Amino acid sequence: MTTYTDKGKKPENGRFLAFDHITFWVSNAKQAASYFITRFGFEPLAYKGLETGSRKFASHAVRMNKIIFIFQAQYEPDETEFVKEVEYHGDFVKDVAFQVENLDYILEYAKKQGAVVVRDLWEEKDEFGVVRMATLKTYGDNTHTLVDRSKYKGSFLPGYQPSAKDPIQNFLPKVEINFVDHVVGNQPDNGMEEAASWYERCLQFHRFWSVDDKQVCTEYSALRSVVMANWEETVKCPINEPAAGKRKSQIQEYVEYHGGAGVQHIAINTEDIITAIEHLRERGVEFLSIPSVYYKIIREKLKNSKVQVAESIDTLERLNILIDYDDDGYLLQIFTKNTQDRPTLFLEVIQRRNHNGFGAGNFKTLFESIELEQEKRGNL
Ligand SMILES: O=C(O)C(=O)Cc1ccc(O)cc1
Ligand SMILES: [Fe+2]
């Protein structure tokens, strides 16, 4: 495991503030949005479609605090890039948007560094002001939209109409998860370095943390991972690639089912993971199971650690929440099962207490749990 200390040179100008929103391309956006509302507790946020003058695509935006997902589907049976990509990948994360300051500088810099511009600077306006955006290509069929909303006062984006509250929320326990912590991209064999260096070269991100396959190895599968972060370290994008092991790496399984590089998981951050997971489980969200021996070992290890975990280990065990720590702090994390039929995307819920890692201490246990699922699928 490597924690990097050199952030490189501070960008002369421009700033990445946070993840703005994440756009999914799906075959049925109405139903996909409803899944995240009913299961995960997102609130309907905004809509655009035929009724609002959007003739080609339906877009349903949902929100939980600062986390915004947009589900988009095409109306007409034309063989567009949208239809081809959704047919090939299945429902997938197409775009991860960043909220930025000084969009012009960031865009010009990326262009000079050879970034592929998918959609050059454009503006969207309504009575609440103007939002400026531009979209760049990253790994696979994925893009990053840069969003400058500094001159906008509306609740989401121009062109959208606010959505009505969903009455189902009156009957289900509330889920409080606050913001996107990181978004992970899986790459095919030997794809990590190229994908990671794009963030350095085009966005002036730096390497924040990494693990190689010697450290992340179960009996069967292995991977390498490097976390790319903006200067302020408010946006983190880990990049994974498979490594050779005795059997098929979970990253290789992803790449085969997704059809190339793509977003593997979205980690969302909460201040109270116990309540969040109790409520998500009550709502029927399924998580990976962790063997009880993990908790036996961690109870012993924590007896000799400098850090105190405030939460009850019995409760964490009952909920299958994982614990990673060092001398200064700890994190609690848990992983959902895949959120679609293909074994591709899943979500992570994470709570941090003075700890900026990604759960390296849990990799072995976590990967063994994933391998149990791979085995059930006949993919190990
Ligand atoms: O690195 C992260 O962000 C993690 O949450 C740990 C992890 C790494 C690789 C996986 O395939 C699944 C989980
Ligand atoms: Fe993660």
Image: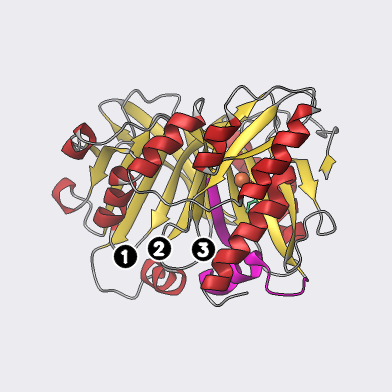
Q: Amino acid at mark 1?
A: Ser
Q: Earlier in the sequence, mark 3 or mark 1?
A: 1
Residue 253 in the image: state x and y as whole percent.
Answer: 60, 70
Q: Is residue 138 above or below residue 374?
A: above
Q: Which residue is mark 3?
A: 344
- Disc 2/disc 1 C-alpha distance (Å): 7 Å
- Identified at 71% across, 62% down, the residue is 241
Q: Is residue 49 above or below residue 5?
A: below
Q: What is the secondary structure assignment of the residue under circle 2?
A: loop
For the residues bearing labels 2 and 1, Cβ distance under 8 angstroms: yes
The disc placed on residue 197 is none
Of the residues tagged 3 and 1, which is closer to the observer?
A: 3
Q: What is the span of residues highlighted in magenta in the rendered image? A: 245-266
- Identified at 73% across, 53% down, the residue is 225
**Does the rendering let one see residue 357?**
no
Of the residues tagged 2 and 3, which is closer to the observer?
A: 3
Q: What is the secondary structure assignment of the residue under circle 3?
A: loop
**Between residues 29 and 369, which one lies in front from this camera angle?**
369
Left or right? Give the position of 9 relative to 76. Answer: right
Q: Amino acid at mark 2?
A: Asp
**Between residues 47 and 295, which one lies in front from this camera angle?**
295
Is 330 a magenta residue? no
**Does the rendering let one see residue 12?**
yes
- Disc 2/disc 3 C-alpha distance (Å): 10 Å
The picture quadrant where one finds residue 209 is top right
- Identified at 34% across, 41% down, the residue is 282
The disc placed on residue 27 is 1
- Disc 3/disc 1 C-alpha distance (Å): 16 Å
Q: Which residue is mark 2?
A: 91
Q: How packed is label 2: few (under 14 Cα within 10 Å), some, or many (20 or more)?
A: many
Q: Earlier in the sequence, mark 2 or mark 1?
A: 1
